[in-house]
Image: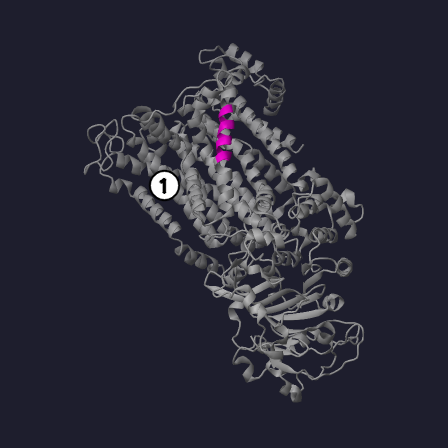
Amino acid sequence: MTVDVSSPTTGDGEDTRLAGGQGRFGRAFLRLRRNPLALAAFGYLVIVGLAAALAPVITPYDYAEPAGPPLAPPSGDHWLGTDGLGRDVFTRLVYAGRVSLQISLSVVALAVLISVPLGLLAGYRGGRVDYVMMRICDAFASFPALILMLAVAGILGPEPRNTVIALLVVVLPGLVRIIRGQARAVRAETFVEASRSIGTPDWWIMARRVLPSVASPVIVQATVLLGTAILAEAGLSYLGLGTRLPKPSWGNMLREAYDTTLFSEPLLAVFPGVAIALTVLAFNTLGDGLRDAFGIANDGPKGRSQRRGITTVKVADRPPAPARAASPGPGAAAAASTPDSRDLLRVEGLRVEFDSGRGPVTVLEDLDLTIRQGEVLGLVGESGCGKSVTALAINRLLPSPPGQITAGRILLDGVDLLGLSLRQMRRVRGREISMIFQDPMTSLDPAFTVGHHLVEAQRNHASVDRATARRRAIELLDLVGIPAAARRMGQFPHELSGGMRQRVMIAAALANNPRLLIADEPTTALDVTVQAQILELLRSLQQDLGMAMLFVTHDLGVIADIADRVVVMYAGQVVEEAGVHDLFARPRHPYTRGLLRAMPSRLTPPGERLAIIPGTVPLPQAFPSGCRFASRCDHATADCARQPVPLLVGADGARVRCLLADPSADANGVAAAPLAGQPRLPGGEPFQPRAPRLTEEVR
Amino acid sequence: MAMVPLALIVSFAVFILMALVPGDPARAIAGPEATPEAITAVREEYHLDKPLIVQYGYWLRDAGTLDLGTSRASGEPVVDEMAERWPVTAGLVAASAVVAMVVGVPLGVLAGIRPGRALDNSSRLLAGIGMAVPNFVAAIVLIVLLGVQTRVLPIRGYVPFTQSPVDWAYHMVLPAVTLGLTLAAIMIRQLRAAMIDTLDSNFVRAAWARGGSPRRVIGQHALKNASMPALTVFGFSIAALLGGTVIIEQIFSLPGLGPFVLSAIIGRDVPVVQAVTLLFVLTQMVVALLIDLAYGWLNPKVRVAQ
């Protein structure tokens, strides 16, 4: 696991090159300073190191000569007492630490010196050199390390030099492997490929590019290996194959105590035992701290509880469900929020926050959506607009932490899904509301067959026997257009193409005849030809089965094909909602117009450039308080940034969040005037300008 | 099949351990008072006059017929003595592996399901201690606490399993716990990290979206996938357990291969060292093979690749 260090050039690596290599270590040091455990370990090791270095100065006695009566208890003269021969235990413990540290440091220093060139060579060169070196490493790895070490130490004889050799044999293969893996990863980076292609010599690339990137994993590994070396040296000395008496080492002190005074004076065994354990623990802790500080491997979120399978809801003043549903706003002003018997799912005032580690960040705010029975609602926007968060929040599938729903209601048949327990929510998921996801390659469990997924989907909700479930599963595979369905049942996901996997996902989603299918960018990860097939399949299934669909995508072309109504999102808010014909014919929000202009179409005159919207979606931490689109908007005025823009709703139910889309803005031509090059609907419906009568939505 | 070159490299490495011995091996075998003729005879008998690679060929051929030479200390065939001691060591390794599984698997999995909770923190503490405390230190602590102070458990001696499984188990508790502690710690860390990763994966989210129960989503989908890396580490760790028996058997006075090889190492009884090392390495390789097979069951991709 520790071999899988993250790519060195993501994020941090980028800065490293700019900062000349200093930045990474500086930042790592700052991060390490915030880790009290690692600091304590470091402090302990500094004390042990100083004591070992200054042993002749700080110890009052000779380690080999009696300094008092045998087996004296701890006292002012003998801090830790004396051993069976009357030697001062504290003195011996300090000198033993000196021996252990000397050997461990030599081993690790030599190991790094040897393994860095070898690992770089194997990883960077690859090919035969790599193959041979890795087979040798494999062979060493399959040796019981301790036996190998004992054999080497035993045959060479108990000399410090031989102990170092024996430990090296054990430590080297793993280190070579780690460096080699890192070197391979760096070699595959584009900037290294580019350097090679312009003829930069290999040695230069290795020294300037590859070496810095292996530095941090090597530092981490060396720290942990110091602990390993301490342990191994202690083991060797314990068995009489390492440091020999009378020269003390923690291992042979333990052995001496075990052999002579274990039952009468167990403390004498405890001191060296504790010294070994604490020192190894300190090296391991410091290694973990360094690993975190360098951002090499993450041990997963720490210090927080995880709630599994359902998004946490923390709505401060959630009104009882029927209260609001029964009392629509006054008059026609609340047209869009009036419950309708055709409404299947109503999302009202949804707010989602993510815990960023530095306080909550609101990623979705005041989100309203209605999906009617049997209708396809398109949800569009650029990446980072909150489309997928919305899709996941409805089924309460956002992981908590970091996600949390802090306001609003999600009403399915008038029942607020935000009030349900996991057990209750399970009866909704896959039965009332099914989902398919963006990445079919990873959304099926690689360890289970296609058939298992489909049978499970049914048996989650109904007590059907396996044979019946299998028959139905084959029907479902037929339904989604998978040929030779019966044979596919026994296949594993990796045996299917991406398009086939998405069909399996769809089949599993349809298993319980859901009333709503949430499709979260279901075609984005697929080839263009396959995209069209899957889209066609979804459209025909939706019509045949009469289910409603929430179709999330960034592709307006897809929306034009499939949706009845469209909700456009920007920076965590709904900015526009309209029927699909209306939206394409008469986009009201400047963002929607920008999206439409950026869309290629058959009607785009050849040679004409597609317009792009300058800039990017702001990060949730940086959402402005006024209009969130203002900084990218051609029409923005000083008013736009001043205060939050309300969502205005027209009599036809269309909604827009733009100050300039006010009826009075007609004169400026913003809301009504069509823009040049604006695409028409595929059907070629004539453009009918109609002044929207907008009123502020009552919320 | 990839194991054949590995087996050759490893056996060669075992073989050349002999070449590391300082001095003339023929003299060492013949004894200090041997005549030059006797030494020459030994040299011919053991093919020591041939190049190293030829010697290796002879050694390999003999090893193939289960002839691993005679112990220089006892004069007995090494294989006979190993056959007698092997059940003790194999039993200890198996018992330690069971301890590691019984302790490590549930703690690692539960810690991974709910990181940050009390159980997670205590498991991580236990894992930290397990990684840092050498097994001989743990053994001594346990002997003092349980064997000497309270006399709950026997601290030395051995009863063959075939004679009385209950007594065998009774005598195995302390050795197996001390030897299994490190592996338990490794399993906790490995499974915890793997569970955290897997529970964040897309297919787990999709399984929740189908309306799966925690038992099905966590206990089936997540656990099966998370156990793959843990299983690999477990397989690798069998080598460490085998090595660890040397110290543990010495401390608890178990008549296994540990004391046998230890005295052989100290006495430079090379055939014994070679034979025991080879047995350990081959055991490790067989375990690796079994792990590969289990892996195929867990991860169908591997099955197809084979």
Within the image, what quadrant is residue A609 found in? bottom right
Image quarter of residue A585:
bottom right
**In this view of the protein, which residue sits in the foreground, B164 or B214?**
B214
Q: Say which of A170 and A292 sits in front.
A: A292
Q: Look at the picture and state if A661 lies above or below A250.
A: below
The correct choice, above or below, for B70 with respect to A208 in the image is above
- Which residue is found at the position 66% from the left and 56% from the top? A432
Q: Is residue A160 visible?
A: no
A241 vs A642, left or right, is: left
- Give the image location of residue A380, x and y in percent: 66, 68
Q: Is residue A68 magenta?
A: no
Task: Report the front residue among A77 and B252.
Answer: B252
Range drawn in magenta = B91-102
Q: Residue furthest bottom?
A: A667
Image quadrant occupied by the N terminus of chain A: top right
Look at 49% across and 15% down and name the residue there.
B163
Residue at image coords 55%, 49%: B197
Give the image location of residue A300, x and y in percent.
50, 51
Name the quadrant of the C terminus of chain A: bottom right
Residue A279 visible from this viewpoint: yes
**Magenta region, mostly helix, strand or loop?**
helix
For mark 1, give the secondary structure: helix
Identify the residue position indicated by label 1 in the image: A278
Provide residue A630's location: percent of width, then percent of height: 58, 78
